[in-house]
Amino acid sequence: MSIQNEKDLQGILKAGKFVAKVRELLKLLAKPGVSTLELDNAAKQEFEKAGAFSAPKFDYKFPGYTCISTNFEIAHGIPKKETILKDGDLVNIDVSAKLDGYYADTGISFVVGQSNASLQKLCETAIEGTMRATKQAFTGNYLRNIGKEIHSAAVENGFTVIKNLAGHGTGKKLHEEPQVLVYEEKRDQRKLGNGLVLAIESFISTGSQTAYEEEDGWTLVASNRRGELSYVAQCEHTVIVQNGKPIIATL
């Protein structure tokens, strides 16, 4: 969607503030010995208190309020009581909500407990890529420059990107046009319009460039042609395109 008035602006900002709050709560609660289902139940309580809808559950009948992925899982991980977090685990928490008719989407990857240096660098690169990309979300800029920044951050730090995953437009639905690639498609001549709402996200990989869906029909993993799995980190923010400095609704 594109922001048309003050109601739209405040609606996106309110939804963004809510999903950011839930993201940070779950990150704080993610300790060794805690299950991903416990984290999701904490999110459920926040959704119910705010009168918000879980976007993946509401739009797609996802079996959880949030997507929580661990280690070699990239995204769309199903919260489970059997998945117990351990020291050094790579975790991704993705929170998207519909609140008062407006959608916002955010996510973060991090290492639980004692930091694993290589995985920590992967997570930091995901954050760097997304934050660099958000600075490109200004009116009249080429859409492809967002992906260019994400890919550049990956390469500069010795990583690659998952090329068949992307960010997206959002606002009135969870997923809207345009698709926001994590690399530069030089043939794409589209420019960003003022007020456009985007979910900008990086998918930074230790090797593979392709995601595959697991047999559960939801969970995504990344592997190369030899079947070797890669770790992947993500960082996602909902951003409003502006003439000047873009507005990040999910900080």
Image (cartoon, rainbow, N blue to C red):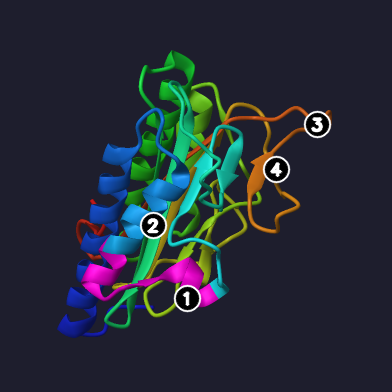
Question: Which three-letter amino acid code belongs to the residue tagged 3?
Answer: Gly
At horizontal 53% and vertical 48% (from top left) the residue drawn is 80
Crowd band around label 1 with a 10 angstrom C-alpha radius: few (<14), some (14–19), many (20+): few
Q: Which mark is residue 107?
A: none
Q: Is residue 225 magenta?
A: no
Location of residue 97 with respect to 223 vertically, above or below? below
Q: Earlier in the sequence, mark 1 or mark 2?
A: 1
Q: Earlier in the sequence, mark 3 or mark 4?
A: 4
At horizontal 47% and vertical 23% (from top left) the residue drawn is 119
Q: In 3D space, how far apart are the residues under numbered discs 3 and 1 (Cα atoms)? A: 34 Å
Q: Which mark is residue 58?
A: 1
Query: Which residue was labeled with disc 2?
Result: 95
Crowd band around label 3 with a 10 angstrom C-alpha radius: few (<14), some (14–19), many (20+): few
Q: Main secondary structure of the magenta part?
A: helix
Q: In 3D space, how far apart are the residues under numbered discs 2 and 3 (Cα atoms)? A: 29 Å
The residues colored magenta run: 46-59
Query: Which residue was labeled with disc 3?
Result: 227
Taking the image as drawn, is residue 241 in sight? no
Location of residue 3 with respect to 19 vertically, above or below? below
Q: In 3D space, how far apart are the residues under numbered discs 3 and 4 (Cα atoms)? A: 11 Å
Q: Are marks 2 and 4 in contact (CB under 8 Å)?
A: no
Query: Which residue was labeled with disc 4?
Result: 210
Q: Nearer the viewer, mark 2 or mark 4?
A: 2
Q: Position of residue 195 (x, y in %)?
A: 29, 73
Q: Nearer the viewer, mark 3 or mark 4?
A: 3
Q: Position of residue 158 (x, y in %)?
A: 54, 21
Q: Earlier in the sequence, mark 2 or mark 4?
A: 2
Which quadrant would residue 6 be assigned to in this image? bottom left
